[in-house]
Image (spheres, rainbow, N blue to C red):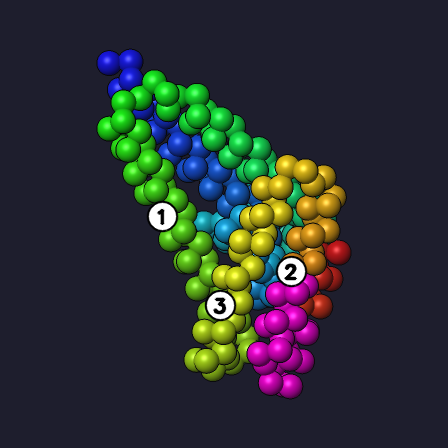
Amino acid sequence: MKSNQSLTALAALAIGTSFLCGRVASAQTATPSPTPVTTGSDQCSMGEHHHHRHGSPLAYLSKSLNLTDDQKAKIQPILDQNAPQIKAIRQDAEAKTKAVRDSMDAQIRPFLTPEQQQQLDQLKARVAEHHHGRFEHRLDHRVAKLTKALNLTSDQQTQVKATLEAARPQFKAIWKNASLSKDDKINQTKTVRADTRAKIRALLNPDQQQQFDALVAAHEARHS
């Protein structure tokens, strides 16, 4: 009985924690951008635009508080200025949360029967598959926005998506590396992001490159 209760508790916590992290991520990192010109992993995508269900934070505030144009003009820079800090805090928290979950798993597993351990592994696999599905959805959305902005061909869309997917494990490895300081993680993230942008740029024709450069410059200006 106790083993069954432990399994149930762990399953609930695993699902609940994953859901909560996703909701917090959406609320905290939904910074508006003209197009997804940055990329990264499931947690840290080149600009990581987890769109709030109401749109950008400013749109949500404007709708909820009936902001005037003057108020929106003053509030937007505050949101832009603080977004990178919130993003860095969230990524650091995600890495620490995973470490706690892994520790909890290791402590509970010895109390489970072999059959329950197998069920737990299957549960974790389903949760991971769910998160991967969410990443794929966001990735397709980013590629679609770039396609619209740059008029990408079918081949370019495939290559851009592959480039973004290749960056994901690099970002995850950075933020899971406990030996790195927060500043080191941020700096290494910027390096991978710049490298990914360069790879995407190399896939474009001269006209598209100019448009892409303008998008990147606009994004950097908004988040500088």
Q: Main secondary structure of the magenta part?
A: helix
| Front residue (pair 172, 133) | 172
**Which element carries disc 1, helix, strand or loop?**
helix
The amino acid type of the residue labelled 3 equals: Ala
**Which element carries disc 2, helix, strand or loop?**
helix
Query: Which numbered tag is attached to residue 193?
Result: 2
The amino acid type of the residue labelled 2 equals: Arg
User: Circle 3: is it few (<14), some (14-19), or many (20+) Cα within 10 Å?
Assistant: few
Q: Residue tagged by mark 1?
A: 129
- Quadrant location, the C terminus: bottom right
| Front residue (pair 164, 85) | 164
| Front residue (pair 67, 86) | 86
Instruction: Give the mark nearest the N terminus, 1 or 2.
Output: 1
Residue 32 visible to the viewer: no
Q: Picture coordinates of residue 179 (x, y %)?
A: 68, 38
* Alpha-carbon span between mark 1 and mark 2: 25 Å
Residue 12 visible to the viewer: yes
Q: Picture coordinates of residue 51 (x, y %)?
A: 50, 53
Q: Residue tagged by mark 3?
A: 162
- Residue at (73%, 62%) from the top-left corner? 221
- Residue at (53%, 56%) from the top-left corner? 168
The amino acid type of the residue labelled 1 equals: Glu
Instruction: Give the mark nearest the N terminus, 1 or 3.
Output: 1
Instruction: Give the mark nearest the N terminus, 3 or 2.
Output: 3
Q: Is residue 156 above or below residue 125?
A: below
* Alpha-carbon span between mark 3 and mark 2: 14 Å
Report the residue that reaches farthest toward the top. Answer: 2
Q: Quadrant of residue 208?
A: bottom right
The segment highlighted magenta reads 194-214
Q: Is residue 191 above or below residue 173?
A: below
